[in-house]
Image (cartoon, grey):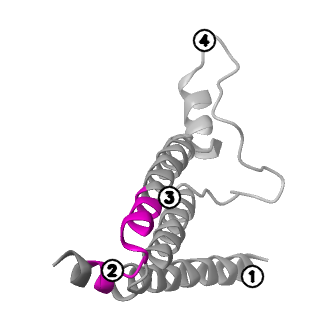
Amino acid sequence: MSELNTFLFNILLFSLFFNVGISLYGIFARPSLIKKIIALTIFSDTANVLAIAVGYRRWPSPNQPPIPPVITTTEPSIDDLTWFARQAVDPLPQALVLTAIVIGLAVTLFLVFLTLQVYRLYGTTDVRRVARLRG
């Protein structure tokens, strides 16, 4: 079972880096603003999944899955804290991803609004044609 988990995690990392490459190509090489926005959305979603993958914690044993990051005892001992640090999932990547999703949505909506304004003014979303029309 461990080899299968390692294999699947490697496929996940490979596909994430492949998505980053494709999205960077779409951002820098495609002339359409719509395609740039789609590529930027793919890039931000890939970065969010990568942040979650960084915070991934393997199960130490088949019987003991990771636990939520909550200490239930009021006076934990050193052994309790050591066990908790070994078992608990780190909530920081999850909190950062939730914040990034909200910020990404706001940025995407702003870029869509700007693209609509460019289309209203120039009649196209092609960056090359807008630069030529602008003079």
Mark with earlier residue (1, 3): 1
Under mark 4, the amino acid is: Glu
- Front label number (1 vs 3): 3
Quarter of the image containing the C terminus? bottom left
On the image, the x and y values in percent for residue 114 come to: 40, 58
Mark with earlier residue (2, 3): 3
- Front label number (2 vs 3): 2
Which residue corresponds to mark 3?
Answer: 51
Give the alpha-carbon distance from disc 1 to disc 2, as whole Å. 46 Å
Other residues around mark 3 within 10 Å, as few (<14) / some (14–19) / many (≥20):
some
Mark 2 residue element: helix
Give the number of the disc on residue 34: none
Other residues around mark 4 within 10 Å, as few (<14) / some (14–19) / many (≥20):
few
Quarter of the image containing the N terminus? bottom right
Which residue corresponds to mark 1?
Answer: 4
Q: Nearer the viewer, residue 64 or 68?
A: 68
Give the alpha-carbon distance from disc 3 to disc 4, as whole Å. 32 Å
Under mark 2, the amino acid is: Val
Mark 4 residue element: loop
Give the alpha-carbon distance from disc 1 to disc 3, as whole Å. 22 Å
Q: Magenta stretch: residue 120 in it? A: yes
Q: Residue at x 35, y 88 (%)?
A: 29
Which residues make up the magenta segment?
Answer: 114-130
Count of numbered circles on the image:
4
Give the number of the disc on residue 127: 2
